Amino acid sequence: MTLNKRCPFFSQILVLLGIVLVAFGCAVQQKPQGGPKDVVPPKLLRATPANQTHNFNSKVIVLDFDKFFKLTNPFQEITISPDQEKKPEYNYTKKPKSLIITFKDSLLKNTTYVINFGKSIVDLHEGNILKNFTYVFSTGTHIDSLSISGKVIDTHTQDREKDVTVMLFSLKEDSVVFSTGTQFGKKKPSIYTTTDTAGNFTLSNLHEGLYKLYALKETSVNRIYDNENELIGIPNHIINLQNDTTGVMLKLFKQVPTKFRFLQPRFDLDGKISLVFNKPLEKPAVRVLFPVLNEDPYVFISKTRDTAQVYIKNMDFDSIKLVVFDNNKPIDTTITLQKLRKESYIRIISLATSVDARNALKPGTDLTITSNIPIAAYDQSLIVLTEDSTAVDFTLQQDTANLKRLTLKYKWKQKANYILTFNEGAVTGFWGEKNKKLAPKKFKLDKPENYSQLNLHITVPDTSKAYIVEFLNEQNSLLQSNSIRKNTTLTYKNLLSGKYKVRVVYDDNKNGKWDTGSAKENRQPENIWVDREVILLTPNFEADKNIEIPREIIL
């Protein structure tokens, strides 16, 4: 009986406890996780004075944004045109989220001013950049309203380029741009923008006048052409801006440096001297000026003619002086390297073959073997080639033009399994070192039906001119190059199935190679046309394709 009387009381407690738990659970609920990432940059809510203000006479501009932001490199990114001798002061507050610009210099009368913020305004939390935001005002009764628009492309690929800096200089400024002959100089452009994802650009609020337009794909963003590896686009002509100008195209290219110099000259761990040039030479050679050597060094020149490796037998010296020749003429620059007289080196011979990643040898070819060190001698009795587990005889020859390469000749058979083994001491290197036993290389002769043939039937627009037809793989690597001046059929044999491209150089000077441009000489690079139709080759197939080279390139 007593227990039954308590039941209602306990029921009330349980109900009350449930309410408390529910309330507590609601109180500790967390914000849902996930959701789309914020990719929106800060947005301008209000400007004081307003953007596009006429008869501007304020010393301070306040820009209010919708989210917290930070200023990144304001004195590099933010420019004001016309330029001011005393730079404005930039501050920002969190409440409200405002950027405050205070002028320290007087403003010119009846002048349109454009403040370009570049990439300086960045979302504090997500890092989203407000690109190419501008604030415009005039100290007179009207605002300059002319514009220049166009696109930037890469000369070699003909693709449109995003995030390229496009810079506008008045003709008066342009005399300063190339004062050094090799770079823009220290004066940055006061009028600039960057291309969008489609490679397009627009420069607005411009005054009438004569201008030159440049494009720069920078390695470090400072709007100064100060690195030989940067790509530059130069104007075809002076822009006489009287009306809005559209359709301007700038082609990016890499200049060939006018002055030769060495890059990263050094002694490698094995003792060879590595020399990298800042530009390719026509017929390079390297000679030792000091010390006097008892035996001529072996000099290996890369296919690109911009790298040399120098191998010297007797390393008993502490310094060496080298000179580079081109076409048997010495180049002014010499190089001196130092080392310890009695220095130890690590010399391990490694060998690579012409067998591809599928462990297949291309039909109709010999097997080439390439060493990392010049080969002084080899012992063929210590080199074993087996065909289906049976040792077979073969012919081995060294390339006299490249002491790092051996050519193995044999009548390869379909469906046979081959193993090539270099036993210890089979190869003697340049300094007398011998190889350790190398891992056996297993391979087969590839099937002829895995390969195709392509016949390119090419029509030229003008038989008085020269063209270079370049055949590329899917990775844009050059497979073959042919100079032509008339309608021609080019045949490419033994091509693996895959995607291929055709690129044509308009060889204006008929020298058989593409020539780059020069900003100093105001010379454009030779034109290039890329056929946008990808050639898809299937196995064991002979394909034909017609290529009609256009008279003019239209992008």
Image: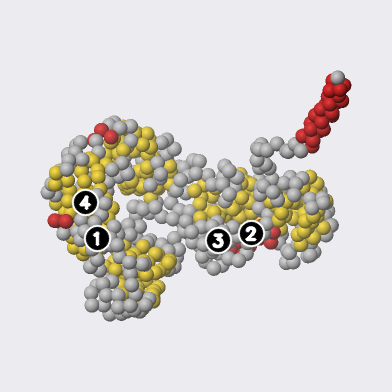
Q: Look at label 4 and name its amino acid.
A: Thr
Q: First in sequence: mark 1 or mark 2?
A: 2
Residue 459 drawn above or below residue 8: below
> Which secondary structure, mark 3?
loop
Residue named by callout 1: 435
Q: Position of residue 282 (x, y in %)?
A: 34, 62
Residue named by callout 3: 225
The label on residue 421 is 4
Residue closer to the observer: 112 or 444: 444
- Pair 1/2: label in front: 1
Disc 1 to disc 3: CB gap under 8 Å? no
> Quick check: 103 left or right of 410?
right
Q: First in sequence: mark 2 or mark 4?
A: 2
Question: Is disc 1 surrounded by few (<14), some (14 to 19) or many (20+) residues within 10 Å?
Answer: some
Residue named by callout 2: 189
Name which residue lies at 59% across and 58% down. 221
Name which residue lies at 58% across and 43% down. 197
Q: Look at label 3 and name its amino acid.
A: Tyr
